[in-house]
Amino acid sequence: MVIVLKSTATVQDREALAEKVTALGFTPHLIIGEERTIIGAVGISGNRDQIFDLIKHPAVDNVVPIQKPYKLASMETRTTPSVIQVGEARFGNGFASIIAGPCSVENEEQMVETAKGVKLAGAKALRGGAFKPRTSPYAFQGLGEEGLKLLKVASQETGLPIVTEVMNPRDLDLVERYADIIQIGARNVQNFSLLKLIGQTRKPALLKRGMATSIEEFLMSAEYILSEGNQQVILCERGIRTFETATRNTLDLSAIPVLQQRTHLPIIIDPSHATGYASLVPSMSRAAIAAGADGLIIEVHNNPEKALCDGPQSLNIEQFAQLMREMEKIGAVVGKVL
């Protein structure tokens, strides 16, 4: 349910209505938009009939049922796109920031050199994996806390906010101390216990779509985070698994307009994991910007040939700088500020 407030509603009105929503068995979520302020009444055990009676309150303009199963992620709760900002990085409603960096943190020289290179080229945030989900238990799994410390060094050198993945709920407190944006990888898109815990943090969350996750399932995963109070969720399309074997995954660029019709949350693209080949990343990145993406997350390594993880899909710094120049031109045409 959505309780739409009048423009004359006061802070006291909001608090009183939130208390009434709680008393009726729902969890209130205050959403202040540019055009209107609403209170989302979320829950399945509340008294739906009585919540409609709130229309009688002098500060209430309307009470509207939400038809979508993803309540807080739906365009029914927020008609204008959300903008999520971390440092100079802004995602949504005309802003398209680029996140760049290596798949895995390997050493200080690698991180600092790569961070400085992508910052100079125009990236607004630094990615790097300290904990790595790998198909093989014998592959490089990341440096753990030491990797987080190296990310922090690179961030301090450049001023770029850190984007890094958490895989295990027991590592969340540790990752939260270092990360500016917490990434949830494709394999954890339906790890509901982890999603709930991230929802209780106040760090922005970057949620990657699973390789076999439908759009509705993707949005329901975002809803787990939103329902716990964290309103800062960035969706990331990173390719889905199909019959095709020419690429690592199949990049679903149609997810951009589909999601923009269904949710106010920003949607970014990961062309590196989607294609699996560095030679394909530039064309897919340009296409993503042209299709209206709110940003990209691109793997960049100062020496891809010696990378411990995903070297074949990583751009070097010079290639990334060239790509940034191309994307800025496309962004100017489609109304995206990179």
Image (cartoon, rainbow, N blue to C red):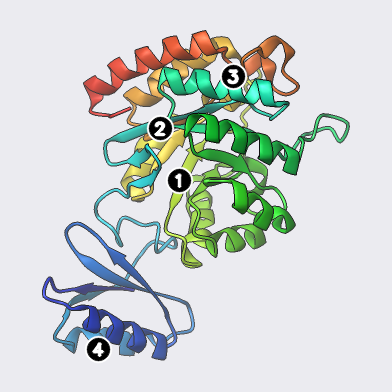
Location of residue 95 by image quarter: top left
**Which residue is labeled 4 in the image?**
53
Residue 296 horizontal/vertical position (percent): 45, 30
Q: Secondary structure at mark 4?
A: helix
Camera-near label (3 vs 2) is 3
**Which residue is labeled 3 in the image?**
113
Left or right, 184 with respect to 98, comes to right
Q: Secondary structure at mark 2?
A: strand
State whether residue 43 appears in this view.
yes
| Circles 1 and 2 in contact, beta carbons < 8 Å | yes
Left or right, 314 with respect to 147, comes to left
Q: Is residue 300 above or below residue 265?
A: above
Name the residue furthest left: 8
Left or right, 198 with respect to 22, comes to right
**Which residue is labeled 2 in the image?**
295
Location of residue 76 by image quarter: bottom left
Distance, label 1 to label 2, CA atoms, is 10 Å
